[in-house]
Image (cartoon, helix red, strand yellow):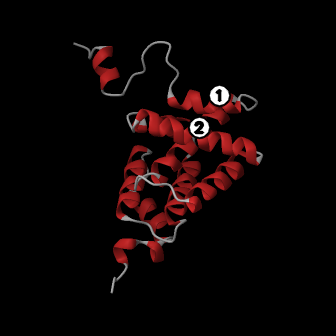
Amino acid sequence: MGVSSDVLRWLGLEQPPGKPDVVDTVASVLAHLDARRARYLAAFAYLLGRVADADHAISAEERDLMLRLVAKEGSLPPQDAAAVVTLALDEFRRVGGTDNVIVAREFAAVATFEERLGLLRCLFAVSAADESVIVSEDNEIRRISRELKIEHADFIDARARVREHLAVLRREP
């Protein structure tokens, strides 16, 4: 017996008919790009936003770095990168995290293994942009790495690059 589409929709695993998914919505501002590339960048920006908002506040440093990373990753002019980041953050807040796994699967489906590792390093960079990787950010990155089927050793390697910013390892006076 199969699971009804209403249950899948309730669980956030299926979109209602005719409703564009989060990746489609964000990718819409990149209509001038190849569809695969636009979807890749949309998911990339959304996943960066998940980490930036892990503490329920996105710092200016985190947002600025997100803009630079999306611009660089997509070879986009600043105004296009800003549109993608803004829309990705708006979509993240609108869906309240219900599409997190779906977006991660989408990214994994269109990204190479090296691109997934690159995203992982970018996630840690965004979390360290304000000089402190707090536990909620670290945990969110770990969830994303699992969703992307990244081995734990690769997660630890990427995490080691921001070791000096890990709040859990800091001694407080």
Establish if 101 lies above or below 63.
above
Q: Is residue 86 left or right of residue 150?
A: right
Q: How far across and down, in percent of the image, does residue 125 sit?
A: 55, 62
- Amino acid on which the number 2 mark rests in the picture: Leu
> Is there CB contact under 8 Å for labels 2 and 1?
yes
Q: Is residue 49 left or right of residue 76?
A: left
Q: Residue 161: horizontal and vertical position, in percent?
A: 51, 70
The part of the image, by quadrant, that contains residue 135 is bottom left
Q: Secondary structure at mark 2?
A: helix
Q: CA distance from mark 2 to mark 1?
A: 10 Å
Residue 49 percent coordinates (x, y): 51, 48
Residue picked out by circle 2? 87
Q: Nearer the viewer, residue 163 or 2?
A: 163
Mark 1: which amino acid? Answer: Ser
Which of discs 2 and 1 lies nearer the camera? The answer is: 2
Q: Residue furthest left?
A: 1
Question: Could you say which quadrant of the image residue 152 lies in?
Answer: bottom left
The structure residue drawn at horizontal position 62% and vertical position 58%, both measured from the top left corner, is 65
- Name the residue carrying label 1: 28
**Residue 75 visible in the current orientation:** no
- Residue density around tag 1, few if under 14, some if 14–19, many if 20 or more, within 10 Å: some
Q: Residue at x 65, y 52 (%)?
A: 67
Instruction: Return the mark for residue 12.
Output: none
- Identify the residue shown where x is 36% and y is 77%: 169
